[in-house]
Image (cartoon, rainbow, N blue to C red):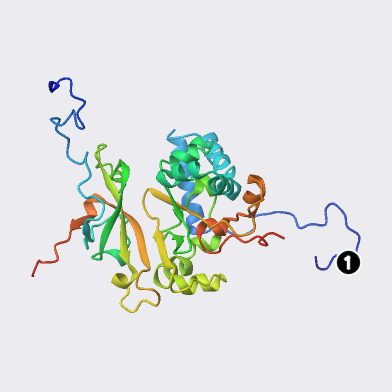
Amino acid sequence: MALSNFDRPSASPQSRIVFATGEKPVFGEGDQVRILSRSPVGHYRVPQYLRGKQGVIETVIEPAAVNNEEEAYGRNAGARRHYYRVAIPMTEIWPDYAGSIRDGLHIEIYETWLERRRDDRTF
Amino acid sequence: MTGHSDHDHRHDDHAEIVESAKPGYYEMMEIAIRELLIERKMFGANEIRQQIEVLDSRTPALGAKIVARAWINPIFKARLLANGRAACEEFGISFYDDTQLIVLENTDKVHNLIVCTLCSCYPRPVLGLPPDWYKQKPYRARAVIEPRAVLAEFGTHISDDVDVRVSDSTAMVRYLVLPMRPRGTEEYSEDELAALVTRDTMIGVVPVTVNARS
């Protein structure tokens, strides 16, 4: 006899709840991303040498964290988003890199600094 | 010791510790901001003193204990690699600064190196204060541009079939390298293993060796 929905130990019993913006990570492991090359005024934790570079999401860093760049100016009001550990080949950053092509740079980047990469895009 | 052989040692023959140099620009700015914040009752002088005491109580010996435990206990190691901060807290090391910790395992295929190109982010809760070279620009710039050359200057030569992974810690995640356990230490106790693990091995600039300590 089939269990009713009420009795069934479902894998996602809370499937109908709606998540707030930023509550769930936008990117997942293996996603191809580009670090934005914005240059806003202020103190930003994304080093210049990585802006505009392409990489892959290695890990979603939990838990979601406040945007400390906004927080520093009192503009955040506690909104949280995720950091991601991003893997970037050294050869992507330095075309004449001396070392193995598998050498890489790894860094945590806040969600607002990442965009999904679409390689078929033609500009 | 120099210049002391021609006269008797007395208790007062050391130079008096005085601050004769004029404070620099940033030192004066720090004093001014600190005094203003205390005056405005944002925090008290005792809270600053207490935080310095917290920082000074953290040393590489804590990180070394974590590494030794991970070497002898695979279940702890799995927890440490899954969530560095939670495993350290379970070990009794508190995280007072709201940072997360990712522990990076060195293997015969991967060598990890840690840097903070923007300033001096460092796993202070488990290692204490960073060494001066870690905070200076040559290391910070070159570790991400030519890590293999930097490692070679520390005497660490990484073969081409080993991947070098540089972690640039810049925001709210800190990194700790879990170095490889050296051969010939199978009979070592946990304490003996911890004694082999130096600060620099946990930054990733050198491997752990049995003869590292004199």
Residue type of the residue flagged with mark 1: Ser
Secondary-structure class at tag 1: loop
- Image spot of residue B98 (x, y percent): 41, 41
Q: Nearer the viewer, residue A106 or B190?
A: B190
Q: Nearer the viewer, residue B159 or B47?
A: B159
- Image spot of residue A78 (x, y percent): 27, 37
* Residue under pointer 1: B5
Res A77 visible: yes
The residue furthest bottom is A96
- Image spot of residue A52 (x, y percent): 23, 65
- In the rendered view of the protein, which quadrant contains the C terminus of chain B? bottom right
- Image spot of residue B205 (x, y percent): 52, 64
Q: Where B21 falls versus B142 (above or below)?
A: above
- The residue lying at 79 percent from left, 57 percent from top is B14
Q: On the image, which quarter does residue A118 sit in?
A: bottom left
Other-residue count near label 1 (Cα within 10 Å), few / some / many at <14 / 14–19 / ≥20:
few
User: Does residue A77 appear to the left or right of B124 in the view shown?
Assistant: left
Q: Nearer the viewer, residue B134 or A102?
A: A102
- In the rendered view of the protein, which quadrant contains the N terminus of chain B? bottom right
